[in-house]
Image: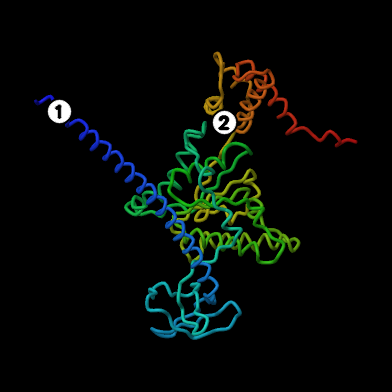
Amino acid sequence: MQKQLGYHANPEREELRQDVINKTAVRNAAQERLRGLMQEVKAQQEELEHVQDQISALLSIGQYVGEILRQVDEERYIVQSISGARHLVGYKKSIKREKLKFGARVALEIITLTIVKVLPRAVDPQVYNMQITGDEKNVSFQEIGGLQEQMRQMREVVELPLTNPELFLRVGITPPKGVLLYGPPGTGKTLLAKAIASNVDAAFLKVVASSIVDKYIGESARVVREMFAYAREHEPCIIFIDEVDAIGGKRIDGTSSDREIQRTLMELLYQLDGFDKLGKVKVIMATNRPDTLDSALMRPGRLDRKIEIGLPNEAGRLDVLKIHASKLTKQGDIDYDSLVKLSEGFNGADLRNVCTEAGMFAVRAGRDYVTNEDFNKATRKVAEAKKLEGAPHQYADQ
């Protein structure tokens, strides 16, 4: 009897199972349709927001830009617009009064000329392009060889005052304002400055001094002034001026272009020790002609530390060579000691060029690795090329 009941129950169970399967399929289909509808709604919402933004842009009224000249009372300020006209205006109560100070850029409501917003300071495009960020600033001290003493001096003069200024306050001394790096080309002056900026959480401005010089009177001094003003607003900041001898040379009577360079130097001197304190702004200058610099720029209080970046000795060349060679795919033992002896008089850039030339010899031979012989040939090739640096021009006697 029980077997018969089980036999009759099986069709009912099968029917229930099939019913569950059908309803599950219906539910899944409904969920799929719901997801599709939700995506359509999201797309339509995004399109609606885009259209609303366009409508708002078409219906919105522009605003004037002005500059605060002075405060008249607690409610009103004298503002000068770009056109030159001056207005006595009020301000929105939502704006913090401490932001409304002399020289601040503000947005003015077009009808009542009420101050409705405080704008960031205008930045000269030339100064803005001086910023070094991201991968350009990603240089570690491990990538610099043969300059251990120079790195120590740089870190205590530039990095330590920015990261631990309380130490100088406890001792009772004022940290140095600027550093001069001098030495032959290719010895790592720029690389050392980048390494300092990479290891300090600070903004980094790099400028070649010759690019500051402008043919229009006063423009070069204005760029220097804008550069230091930008640095003060983005403290901590490091300013690196390369080839500073282009604007910091000894002052002599000359043409109008020489006078423009002198004006630029005078502005630089004022920014270094003027009434406005540099604060957490450090200045690094580099040159390979320290003998041509003006004595006013070299005196203590402006460039307090002078660091020579000379040609590396044997130990330094070995460090630099190993750093650059570590990036190459090598096979067999590399006799670094013999390479160091062959590279007498090489600077850091020459040693990097040795590794590049060794790689080129490997490519020319159809190999994907570099051997000791490639390094030997590359060192001799770079040594031959260096002979041209001090040689007279081949057409000099013709």
Furthest toward the top, the residue is 332
In the image, 119 versus 191, the foreground residue is 119
Question: Along the polypeptide, which appears first: circle 1 or circle 2?
Answer: 1
Q: Is residue 66 visible?
A: no
The image shows a total of numbered marks equal to 2
Identify the image quadrant of the C terminus.
top right
Q: In what element is the residue under mark 2?
A: loop
Q: Is residue 97 above or below residue 179?
A: below
Residue at image mark 1: 6
Mark 1: which amino acid?
Answer: Gly
- Disc 1 or disc 2, which is closer to the eye? 1
In the image, 317 versus 206, the foreground residue is 206
Q: Is residue 58 above or below residue 317?
A: below
Q: Is residue 353 above or below residue 213?
A: above
Q: Residue at x 55, y 47 (%)?
A: 180
Residue at image mark 2: 312
The image shows residue 57 at horizontal and vertical percentages of: 53, 70
The image shows residue 267 at horizontal and vertical percentages of: 59, 63
Q: Is residue 210 visible?
A: yes
Identify the image quadrant of the N terminus.
top left
The image shows residue 100 at horizontal and vertical percentages of: 43, 75
Q: How is the image coloured?
A: rainbow
* 10 Å crowding of disc 1: few (<14), some (14-19), many (20+): few
Label 1 vs label 2: CA separation?
96 Å
Q: Residue at x 48, y 69 (%)?
A: 119
Instruction: Answer whether labels 1 and 2 touch (C-beta < 8 Å).
Output: no
Furthest toward the right, the residue is 398
